[in-house]
């Protein structure tokens, strides 16, 4: 689902043409097993003209939590999804509710200062806890389980970086403990030089979490439409109108919750690097095989780039992910998928010797956006009146989906969150200008 920019239609308005997005995933994700839960209503196609306070473009997890948060603040909501709910990037997600940003704490501190880096860390921790709490209160059946995270290094250079990062975190009151190589091996069966262990993370089934949140939003009054691709966005002096092939929605604001800036948003696209990521799952493993693998119920990450991660999924399946690579042309994507999943299997077996001889039964690939600092873009952009964006999540999609919902609803209620600036589109420009002044 996407929206985009075109020519000006007349003074005081902007007409935005919307084109098709590339496929957001390939392969066979384990989350589709058994189909959608029977209690999930099937949204209709938009075939009329509506009005609302907010129109949301995108039917994934971000759209769902934004819709729920807007409703909780008394705003009326219409949501448009081009395909089926939770059928894009959300279903390619491996279900890690992890709050540590893709960028090391030391890297964020060097860019923006330690105070800002601490605020990013705290807001991410709060978002992970709040999102898990909401799913619990709504009794969403999505396999939610609290987990520790082990962030491991395997080379001398990454050990040095991670030790320095651990020290700097402690200097600023961020919790975590260092595991030496022997302890890492005992805890995970993973070869490495050390790791940082942190608490407060979780794992879940992202497909069912998303559908459960959309169900709660619909019960709360959200009008949700599937198979309703936005074809044009017209912006007037005080409103937007989002058109589909068979209807339209007039609203005060439109929220673009598509995961990344589509080609139609050309002025924004330079802030992203589109990346393919790969995931594999074993079949259900018996106790002897699980003991051979050696990984307990934790989230395991490697600190190298591209990184790898492992966690236990439903039915005692092991899910592994990583081996990210830059965007390839759509015509080459199938062949790249085959190479990527083979590379991922080879590399995780080298990382965790206990995986040798254990087959992977499913493989899938997702397309996601990487930003220069590993943080998302959340909020308005001066080129797009009455638009709000939630884009560029990297490896923390579910955490940043919730954080985006909290930050964006402040824009509607007239009480913008002061931390919105940490995730704004112009944060990198401010940083670069400040760096030039200091030189």
Image: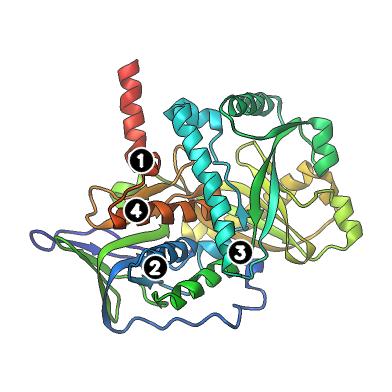
Quadrant showing the N terminus: bottom left
Question: Along the polypeptide, which appears first: circle 2 or circle 4?
Answer: 2
Disc marking residue 421: 1
Q: List the single residue furthest toward the right.
A: 288
Residue displayed at 56% across by 69% down? 138
Disc marking residue 59: none
Q: Nearer the viewer, mark 1 or mark 2?
A: 2
Q: Residues within 10 Å of mark 3 (few under 14, many from 20)?
A: few
Residue bearing the label numbered 3: 136
Q: Residues within 10 Å of mark 1 (few under 14, many from 20)?
A: some
The image shows residue 430 at horizontal and vertical percentages of 32, 31
What is the CA distance from the residue labelled 1 to the residue labelled 2? 24 Å
Residue 253: quadrant of the picture: bottom left
What is the CA distance from the residue labelled 4 to the residue labelled 3? 24 Å
Callout 4: helix, strand or loop? helix
Q: Nearer the viewer, mark 4 or mark 1?
A: 4
Looking at the image, residue 277 sits to the left or right of residue 74; the answer is: right
Question: Along the polypeptide, which appears first: circle 4 or circle 3?
Answer: 3
Residue displayed at 37% across by 72% down? 80
Q: List the single residue furthest toward the top.
A: 439
The image shows residue 321 at horizontal and vertical percentages of 65, 52
Looking at the image, residue 98 sits to the left or right of residue 380; the answer is: right
Callout 3: helix, strand or loop? helix
Residue 169: quadrant of the picture: top right
What is the CA distance from the residue labelled 1 to the residue labelled 3? 30 Å
Residue bearing the label numbered 4: 410
The image shows residue 73 at horizontal and vertical percentages of 37, 63
Compare residues 4 and 315 and report the one nearer the observer: 315
Disc marking residue 71: 2
Q: Residues within 10 Å of mark 2 (few under 14, many from 20)?
A: some
């Amino acid at each position: 689902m996407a929206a985009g920019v075109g020519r000006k239609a007349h003074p005081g308005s902007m007409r935005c043409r919307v084109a098709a997005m590339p496929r957001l995933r390939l392969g066979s994700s384990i989350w589709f097993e058994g189909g959608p839960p029977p209690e999930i209503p099937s949204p209709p196609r938009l075939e009329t003209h509506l009005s609302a306070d907010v129109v949301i473009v995108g039917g994934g997890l971000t759209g769902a939590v934004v819709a729920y948060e807007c409703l909780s603040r008394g705003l009326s909501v219409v949501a448009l999804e081009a395909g089926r709910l939770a059928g894009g990037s959300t279903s390619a997600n491996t279900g890690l509710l992890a709050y540590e940003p893709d960028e090391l704490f030391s890297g964020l501190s060097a860019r923006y200062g330690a105070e800002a880096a601490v605020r990013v860390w705290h807001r991410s921790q709060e978002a992970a806890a709040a999102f898990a709490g909401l799913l619990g209160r709504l009794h969403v059946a999505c396999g939610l389980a609290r987990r520790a995270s082990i962030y491991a290094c395997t080379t001398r250079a990454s050990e040095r970086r991670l030790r320095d990062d651990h020290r700097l975190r402690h200097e600023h009151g961020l919790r975590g403990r260092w595991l030496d190589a022997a302890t890492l091996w005992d805890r995970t069966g993973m070869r490495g030089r050390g790791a940082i262990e942190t608490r407060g993370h979780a794992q879940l089934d992202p497909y069912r979490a998303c559908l459960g949140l959309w169900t709660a939003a619909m019960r709360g009054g959200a009008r949700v439409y599937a198979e309703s691709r936005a074809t044009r966005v017209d912006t007037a002096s005080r409103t937007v109108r989002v058109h589909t092939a068979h209807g339209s929605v007039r609203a005060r604001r439109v929220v673009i919750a598509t995961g990344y800036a589509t080609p139609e948003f050309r002025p924004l696209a330079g802030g992203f690097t589109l990346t393919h990521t790969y995931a594999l799952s074993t079949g259900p493993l018996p106790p002897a095989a699980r003991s051979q693998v050696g990984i307990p119920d934790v989230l395991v990450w490697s600190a190298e780039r591209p990184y790898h991660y492992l966690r236990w999924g439903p039915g005692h399946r092991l899910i592994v992910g990583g081996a990210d690579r830059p965007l390839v042309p759509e015509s080459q994507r199938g062949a790249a998928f085959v190479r990527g999943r083979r590379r991922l299997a080879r590399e995780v077996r080298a990382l965790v010797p206990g995986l040798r001889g254990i087959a992977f039964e499913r493989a899938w690939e997702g397309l996601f956006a990487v930003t220069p600092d590993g943080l998302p873009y959340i909020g308005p952009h001066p080129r797009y009146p009455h638009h709000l964006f939630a884009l560029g999540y990297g490896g923390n999609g579910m955490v940043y989906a919730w954080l985006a919902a909290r930050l964006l609803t402040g824009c509607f209620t007239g009480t913008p969150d002061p931390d919105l600036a940490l995730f704004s589109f112009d944060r990198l420009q401010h940083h670069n200008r400040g760096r030039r002044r200091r030189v």
